[in-house]
Image (cartoon, rainbow, N blue to C red):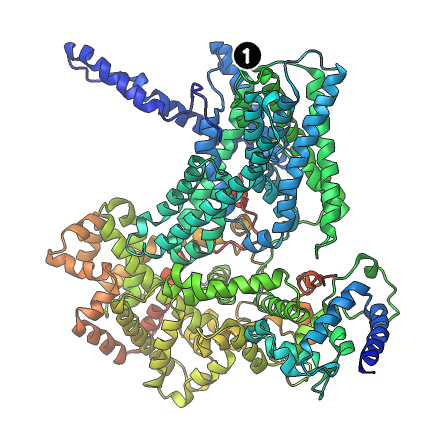
Amino acid sequence: MRQVSGVALLLGLMALPAALGQRSSESPKYSNQSFAIVSFKWDHVKEPYIIALWILVASLAKIVFHLSHKVTRVVPESALLIVLGLFLGGIVWAADHIASFSLTPTVFFFYLLPPIVLDAGYFMPNRLFFGNLGSILLYAVIGTVWNAATTGLSLYGVYLTGIMGQLHSGLLDFLLFGSLIAAVDPVAVLAVFEEVHVNEVLFIIVFGESLLNDAVTVVLYNVFDSFVAIGAANVTGIECLKGIVSFFVVSLGGTLVGIFFAFLLSLVSRFTKHVRIIEPGFVFIISYLSYLTAEMLSLSAILAITFCGICCQKYVKANISEQSSTTVRYTMKMMASGAETIIFMFLGISAVDPDIWTWNTAFILLTLVFISVYRVIGVIIQTWILNRYRTVQLEIIDQVVMSYGGLRGAVAFALVALLDKDKVKDRNLFVSTTIIVVFFTVIFQGLTIKPLVQWLKVKKTEHREPKLNEKLHGRAFDHILSAIEDISGQIGHHYLRDKWSNFDRKFLRKILMRRSAQKSRDQILNVFHELNLKDAISYVAEGERRGSLAFIRSPSTDNTVNVDFSTPLPGTVESSVSYLLREKAGPVCLDMQALEQRRKSIRDTEDTLAHHTLQQYLYKPRQERNSSVIPNGNIPSENPVQDFTLKEKDLEFSESEENNDYETLHLGKGVNFLANVTKQNFTDTPAGDMDHDVEMTEYSSSDDQLNQNGNVSVNPLHFFPSCLQMPWTQNYSSLENRGNISLSAVSEYIASCDPNVPDLFWESGTDMNNKETVNSGYCSEVSFKSENSQEENTLLMFEGLEDSYIKEPQEKKMLLDIEGNYRSAAARRVQSRRSFHRPKPLHHPKLQKLASLPASCHVPPHSLEQEETQL
Amino acid sequence: KMFSDTAFVRDESQEDITTEHSVSHSQITRLYSRFTSLDKGENGTLSREDFQRIPELAINPLGDRIINAFFPEGEDQVNFRGFMRTLAHFRPIEDNEKSKDQNGPEPLNSRSNKLHFAFRLYDLDKDDKISRDELLQVLRMMVGVNISDEQLGSIADRTIQEADQDGDSAISFAEFVKVLEKVDVEQKMSIRFLH
């Protein structure tokens, strides 16, 4: 497929070795001269330099476009980029009079298309996709064949009438052109539809069609290309039959290659626990290999990488760490968005080349008319057939949008650029027409589709907060429907999905998922977890709103009391270590292994803390609450500890399976933490307050202002009424742009007040010497000179808490001892505030996690793109 | 004689059911043959055991609840009419039904009836409320064994809290409808019965 002709490459990375070779051949010449301190070696860096410059220009252009909301709201970015490309191409041509830059098929198919398709596959809303797979396949296969055949035949018919004048093409050439212009383009569809936000069913049908029609396009293109090559006279029935067979081979083969690599990728990601740093790399490399392998076997590469993404997403997301998941997400979005930008800009630039232009008004206009008309007819006929079988009917409005959304794009351009001028005599005309068609659909239809959608009042997607009820009852609905299908004895979607999920649970998950992930991958549980996280954030936001963030920024008046505790307490150490690691150590420390180890231990403790906090403070089952209130001020001694560690294990979302020392750590922390909590309940709360919840006493002991509020409400959720009523959506942009309680506000706030935190902690927890150490090259000293006695203390804290429990039992004893023997009221108050610090470090990582919460199906695959900075 | 009896019952009931639930003849015929194939006792009614013989239903976490929904209060046999009555809940809502006059009895496949069907699966004691215990039972069936009771408890609590408006720590049907108002129940609780 797509044998790439040896076109001169602009972006071709292969040119780099050539440039290097050139340099080495020139080097003897230079050796005669004296040594030059500075030499200008443009040729040496030329190729990558130009590539980088173009990428920079395209990215800067994106920034510029988004400076004005008015423009981007009306004009799709893809159209703007094409215009920019035309403009830049014009400048280059005016300066050089050679059109040296163009979108070459090699670069497009090998480097620009894969990231976009992988992104689409990896973030494909699977349930929606497979729920509509039948419709998608019909549109993709029959629709594309229909478009290709009718367009090609009609053009040929008109050509016979003589309107187009004299061309050098026969029927096969027209059919070849029809087949390459027929396919709806995934890149163009994504670029336009993601700004339109039509409802998800409509989106998935148009987008799915554009992805899956690749196999048809490839086969049709190859078949007609070879037919043209062997000449019309030699085409026999057997050749046609071969073409049909090759369609099945190409499409099913491509899909199978994708599934195979998805399996491989999932399996690999199961064992990357100790190489977290390169974990995201596997996702990209293995997916890319699936693309290349399919290309090598001349199967549908787009199908391969799409299905690789679709099939692996569930297992990979469950296996890799939260950070890796975020990395994958952002890298993928960045590459896809970048590739898309470059594609559209270079489509514009490629058009500025007088050599490729051949104008034939009748041919070009008729092509435009035919592709539009036949698209409409095709959609209407197919929808009529489909609606007899679909539960969700596709209405007239949907059909209009589907017809209008049939955008052609870079795939068609790259395919037409691949044509051999010797075989296809009218190549230039085809190229010109393709460019016009692409520009027309992307610019004109892209520009008008938004008003059209608004005018027709097409149902749009709405982003809303996930509700536990919706998830739970939705699950029940699924079970009900599959039961009804079983009872009525028909094999439908629900039946098949049930069968698949049983198979998945029994076999696939056991092979492809980590043991810990197998447990925690329940969607209801995930939603529950998410909601708890949001509560945690609302809690900070609410505190911020009330201006009582005393628990984050310690008032300086208490510093004198803090001196009483010379031993660092877990809470303070945690905060400061986490903070310093995150803010300072990261970029400096070069020992990846060490960094990784530390990060991991801290992440685990943070997770632990997060769970503690969430469980203890933010949400507490009603029934449990009553039992956990300490009656008559008695400290529950053994049972709660047991309880707590048990809960700990159950809640452990990160993997603790193979690490027994982590278990120990958690157990230790659990004991410690609980000792803290119960202690406070015992000591800090007046007897009259005893019937309040644990979390209430916790708050009230730490902050007077919160205390008043806390007493009012028994219901922990009503504790932050306004926050909880704030609609939280999963949409990234809305998350970041939301006003008062937004993520950005919270994180900004934390960023603004954090610098004080470590100082305070250091003052309270350690002596001044240590603080000095910390401030001067903390990371490098600590990580490389651990034998230094002064560092020992710091290192201890730095390495996470496990050491303090595992290696130094007396230390642990001391900590518990201190907690067990409070004397002064001031000490108790400080202690309570300290323990309040403890949840603090979770804000940072948890906020980040929220930003990377599993994108639900409502987020269209490309929507991260909308997350551009709004200026 | 036996043969003519069944044929008679079949014709009569089919006519009625066709008009009652506005299902097509071919659908009725297909479902009737399904009904008879399930009816191992060959007495024109289905018992719980007949349903439980369906292998997929046995592993459906809500299988027993759904089977129960087919049986009217206190009975343990269901005839074809009753069978169809339950299935009719899941018929998709046609376009022409949306604009139907409001006076007539609400069709079984209305949104409200679909929701009520689901609601009854939770509400074991039929007090028109989903209590914490009832919710917990369903949760345990659906979410599985990997999760501790305590965690399930907090999920149940949170679920109730999310829906509860009058503060009785239970979900009434009105609250159930309200909390699912954004969900496309018409679509999610419908299947297209084959012809």
Q: Nearer the viewer, residue B8 or A214?
A: B8
Left or right: residue A613 compared with residue A575: right
Identified by mark 1, the residue type is: Asp
Q: Residue at x 25, y 60 (%)?
A: A763
Q: Is residue A213 above or below residue A605?
A: above
Q: Residue at x 26, y 80 (%)?
A: A820
Q: Looking at the rendering, which quadrant does residue B98 occupy?
A: bottom right
Say which element carries label 1: helix
Q: Is residue A86 visible?
A: no
Give coordinates of residue A808: x percent, y percent. 17, 70
Q: Nearer the viewer, residue A353 or A257?
A: A257
Give coordinates of residue A620: x percent, y percent. 48, 75
Q: Is residue A67 above or below residue A164?
A: below
Left or right: residue A593 compared with residue A12: left
Provide the residue designation for mark 1: A355
Give coordinates of residue A761: x percent, y percent. 29, 61
Q: Is residue A408 visible?
A: yes
Q: Is residue A815 above or below residue A146?
A: below
Give coordinates of residue A726: x percent, y percent. 58, 60
Q: Nearer the viewer, residue A241 or A91?
A: A241
Left or right: residue A759 compared with residue A170: left
